[in-house]
Image (tube, grey):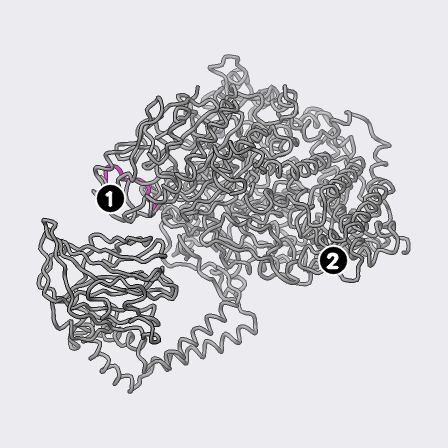
Amino acid sequence: MKPSPVLDPHPELRQFLAQRQTRRVFLGRSAQGLGALALASLLNPSLSAAVAGKDKKIVGASYPLDFPQKAKRVIWLTMAGGPSHLETFDPKPKLGEMSGQPMPSSFTAGKQIAQLQGQKLLCFAPQYGFKKFGRSGTDVCELFPQIGSVIDEICLIRSMTTEAINHDPAHMFMNTGSQIAGRPSMGSWTTYGLGSESEDLPGFVVLTSLGKGGQNQPIAARQWAAGYLPSRFQGVHLRGKGDPVLYLSNPPGVTHAQQKDMVDAINVLNAKYDKIVDDPEISTRIVQYEMAFKMQTSVPELMDVKKEGPGTLELYGCQPGDGSFASNCLLARRLAERGVRFIQLYHKDWDHHGGLKEGIAYKAQEIDRACMALITDLKQRGMLQDTLIVWAGEFGRTPMSQGGDGRDHHNAGFSIWMCGGGVKPGMVYGATDELGYSAVENPIDVHDLHATMLRLLGIEHTKLSIKFQGLDVRLTGIAGKAVQEIIT
Amino acid sequence: MPSLSLRAMVSRLAVFAVVLNVFAAGLAKGAQAITYNRDIRPILSDDCFHCHGPDQKTRKGKFRLDVREDAVAKKAIVPGKPKESSLVDRIFTTNTDDVMPPLEAHKALTPAQKDLLRHWIADGAKYEKHWAYVPPAKSAVPANQNPVDFLIRQRLAQIGLKPSPLADRATLMRRLGFDIVGLPPKPEDVDAFVRDKSPDAYSRLVEKLLASPQYGERMAIGWLDVVRFADTIGYHSDNPRNIWPYRDYVIKAFNENMPFDQFTREQLAGDLLPGGTREQKVASAFNRLLLTTEEGGAQPKDYEARMLTDRVRAVSAAWLGQTIGCAQCHDHKFDPIKQRDFYSLGAFFADIDEPIIGRREPGMLLPDEQQAVKLKVLTEELNLAQQQFDAPHQDWDVAFVKWQTIQTETSLQERRWTALQPVTAVSGSGNKLKIEKDNSVLAKGTNESAAVYTVSFTNVINEVVALRVQALPHDSLPQHGPGRAKDGNFILSEISAKLVHADLTSEPVSFKSARADFEQAAEGTNSRSRSAASVIGALQHEEDSGWSIFPQTNQEHQIVLELSEPLNLQAGETLLLELWQNTPGSALGHFRLGETTNTEALRGPLSEPPPNDIVDILVTPSDKRDNDAKEKLFSYFKSIAPETADARMRLADAHQFKDKFEESIPKCLVSATNAQPRTVRILARGNFLDETGAVVEPALPGYLADTEAKVAGRRLNRLDLANWLVSPQNPLTARVVMNRLWKQFFGVGLSRVVDDLGSQGEMPPNQRLLDWLAREFMDSGWDMKHMVRLIVSSDAYQQTSVISEKIKARDPLNREIAAQSRWRLDAELVRDNALSVSGLLVDDKIGGPSMKPYQPDGYWENLNFPVRDYHATEGRDQYRRGLYVWWQRSYLHPSLQAFDAPTREECAADRNRSNIPQQALVLLNDPTYVEASRALAEHVLKEGGSNTAARLIWAWRQVLCRAPRGDELQTIQALLEKQLAQYQADPDAAQALLKVGHMAAPTDANPAELAAWTNIARVILNLHETITRS
């Protein structure tokens, strides 16, 4: 090979050496060129406080916290498709009496309606009975006796409302506080504010499961996107099939040890490059390769629930690797134990436009025991007190019939529940009208729910904001009020 | 875990920059005068305007600080007298009730900001119009200097910095490659450039790159982000739409250096241009790039509002750099944008002809020359067949008369029957019966066992002489039914009936005879009867016996049951009919029961009657039928008659050939005008249910243009909007475009907030430079290549990106451009670079449909309606550039997403530049990068010489345009030896690694050696330097 100018080992090295001759040391290496962290703390004193705080590892935009932190982490059980409150948590005997009769227009005037637009609106009786559970004597649908058995741990909210009435925008609104695509989701906001306690798992993890009824509405990845927050706050989807995390497995023919040698070599070479060009991005890159490699071990270990023992599997009612909601609840507990900040489960198939009676029975089979198990398990381990569980769909369903055996989408009043993490147990908050149409007592909206969640996490929701297109944008938009009454 | 957010830093930047500027300027030449736009407005806008600004609904204390007269009248500001100004009083007070901004606003002024405000009032409190709303002007620049360098050096001199030295040529060539064409240079070309001592070597290189067809591909990436180009609709089902030809248009426009004003007009209004070409119509696909939905239950008014706001955001992001979207619900809080401006801007798009909800149309056909010829032939053939079918045929007329006679009798016969209305319909088996609105009964559920359907009726009837069962086809049934057997057949074994009196006593109802319109042929001697007659008589409950209709599935059939005695049903009585289907799995799927009191019905024909609307005509005497009815009848006849079959088939074939051929022709959604534009109202608080707001017509934003601008005799249209956007009267477009262009070449915009040049954005530290570029862009006739050339020819661009300590200390974010910057490549270029250096990249083909890279199985499992499979593109197209990757909005390809490619659900002028573990997983394990590594390894072994050191040098040159240093060689050589030993010991592992990807590994290579080198290549492709433009 003839000599080539490109044999120059490192042209940038010369530049670097030339500059060093005239270098005047302003600051030490740690603040050289104001590394990202140093610069950030210079610009935002509250961040430097976080860095200098008790736990030096955890960095987040919300430190020091505005309130005592009652919940350290969140497990959000999204019941995708929109569960009927009338067959779960909101008993309406009057609706049963009026079944088949026209829905009085005083209830429906001026409200959004989805598929029932322009149709005759007839009352549709609750398809199952309700029973009283717990010391609180709370009415819960007879299909959910296991949740009923732990109802004294739960704060049931019967006055939830939302702005959207179609699945996709309604999920966006519930997750991001906006119906416009591209906003950060609540899991991203939470990890942005609080950082993560886990060093080898992402701070925000998403799990999905399908229902047997076949009404599995699509879910877009934007529901757990970081939006305009940095990408590392995006939710990582742990998948039931294939690699639990995308691209987690080594290529075929590459052993764990070989992969480690390669990652080590990459990091050594990157460190050498950093010495020359002095770019803080390189040390971040090295940390991320270490993290990626750790995940290649920690995630399979996390997913392996066989070690849990038969007692636990029986409590949840799941088999290892069955991909069920119950399995995901068990994984949620394992993630919580490992310090993951925000764990969101999607269980689909709640979209009962028709065949509601059968469909909701499937759902009860799938979630009733699992929800009880999650609460019980966390409590036994002493983690319920600082883990907030939220059970919520993107909306509820109409008191009116659709096609004689179903209910349409509904946003004027529906039920959700919260549990643990500083929420008052054994409480029922708010109520809908006598036909279950509108929230009339203590209505709360999605911004209020977010504000309450953030309050429990120790964050004043108006302070958790970021500049986007010149504006201070928040999870709670320009609204939201934490619901004090349900906080211990 | 990692460091803090870049965004968080940026968020404080406006403030920081002001402090820095003041500080730095102070160092340079004593205190600099405070100016409103640079120093004061950012503070007022951030901390005061929300309550004392443009939005009167949130205004407090009835005064505003954004208008000087107001502030002065209220004595908030007393020019020259800070002590008398209540503003100063309120910001410095320690009284927590009085202090401004109020505590509950969670905004606090720093001492430096407070001092600035006080000094500014002391200096006379001069206001300025917002910098970006003043038309850009050119500063004087000496003729012999690059204006970019002159204007940068002026600023640098003020703050005591000097430009950095120029980068070395290898670095420069790699930089130019990524910035202008998005691809790295070949090492031999780098050699030639480094050796080239001629004074115009650099400019010749720039010209070569600008002339390359890859320039258009590179430039398209940013524009496709801004206009949110994607292959799918976005919402809910996120189904595909035909749109890729628009991407080809964008690439071509950049390559041909189409003036940007023309580019603007064609996209917004290509369909409105006089004599518009096909390409200009494709350009107008811009208006169709928004998100749409096919979700059931979506409300048109809701989505009309969503689509309007989506388009306003797009225009304001792409051209105006304004956050007009904020004015959807209220007047803007920081900029003088009224809610009316928002809706008036949206009204420009109210004419676009499109479905609000549901599937998009296939779009405009875009045949190439060959396709156009064939399409013409097929169209002519179709026209001919149609003519033949429409022409008079005497024999058809004769047959028509005969047909009418028969069908009239059939129709009269049909009218003799009345449907029975079922009250209940139940099945003893897994079949679930549902009563439909037309009184038919549809079976769902499982269909494995024998079934008995019991249907009850309470219709009051008198003197009924016969009952009948109609077996009806249905789309939910196999082969459309009418049965539930796999072949669409059924076996109706037995029918029994019972009359239940009011006192619950009952009596059987017996049948005298049964006949059907069609009976399946009995098979063989052993087989049971398939006749209608077998269903009546005493119940035998035999399997495999009963009335069946195969092969006439997907048709209506009927069985008529003559009663032994006339039947009466009084009020309070119930008729129970039992349909026994004794053969497992062969129940009826869809049926209706009927009765007749007319004995004629027993004798007449049993053929299937025509559809109801045709029956209506037939039972009308022929002299009472109007012309429409006659024509309809004749058309129907022609659509089914055996006599017309030949001509009909020919026509159907001609249709099918043409349709099928059209499927293979590229199509693109384009804009078309509907003569009846949608009514646009101002929606109070953005609420689409509120129809009380004022109706608005298209109008330009009042704060930038004359809202009264009119064109005689018509309402303003999209072309008027486009013309204004690129007119000298609009101060924003050129600045916005140049700011984004600057970001492409320096990593950061001259104004850092590239998506907002409003008062919440950042006033550019070097505003004179941005204004000069904007003005020059307009003066040059919106010549994009001219601007690129100007920028990359500057010394500023050619500086090294190794930043000196002095610069880092004085200007830590490098806003004054005393050096170049370094950054991680954009997502598409990460892919392009790996494919290019490994020799896999297909770069001789520009444009075309999107391709699908390898993707993890099941990544689309959460998509539905329909459920979707993913098949990675086969053949050469697998190795195309990143900008051609299939853009699935709700599940963007995970490798692109890991490197911050936006989902393009919204316009994205700015990308994150994150550094996350997923990037490591992609580069290490995604088959695209593993295969590229193997391909690179093949080249190393073939072309890199015979010894390890030479090969490593070759690989380094190939990927990084430089040779490895000694310490690097040490690290990599040790790794190579270890890997080689491992693969020699485990040949299966080597084979497994070499099989990754579609392209087969060479058979003549030593597998262990190639596998080991593949891993070495993986290390090199994973280096930070590899994915960094420096």
Callout 2: chain: B
For disc 2, the marked residue is B839
Q: Is residue B899 left or right of residue B1008?
A: left
Q: Residue at x 37, y 52 (%)?
A: B678
Q: Main secondary structure of the magenta part?
A: loop
Query: Vertically, is B928 above or below B657?
Result: above
Q: Which mark is residue A122?
A: 1
SS label for mark 1: loop
Q: Position of residue A280 (x, y in %)?
A: 72, 34
Q: Position of residue B490 (x, y in %)?
A: 32, 65
Residue B287 vs residue B669, the one in the foreground: B669
Total numbered circles = 2
Give the quarter of the figure containing the C terminus of chain A: top left
The percent coordinates of residue B86 (x first, y second) are 49, 18
Task: Using the rendered view, name the quadrant where residue B161 is placed.
Answer: top right
Work out which residue is located at the far bottom of the displayed protein and give it.
Answer: B394
Residue found farthest to the right: A2
Residue B163 in sight: no
> In the image, is B516 to the left or to the right of B61?
left
Under mark 2, the amino acid is Gly
SS class, disc 2: loop
* Quarter placement of the N terminus of chain A: bottom right
Q: Is residue B798 visible?
A: yes
Residue span colored magenta: A105-114
Q: Position of residue A290 (x, y in %)?
A: 70, 36
Q: Amino acid at mark 1?
A: Leu
Query: Dot 1 falls on which chain?
Result: A
Query: As rendered, which of B176 and A284 lies closer to the eye?
Result: A284
Does residue B187 belong to the magenta stretch? no
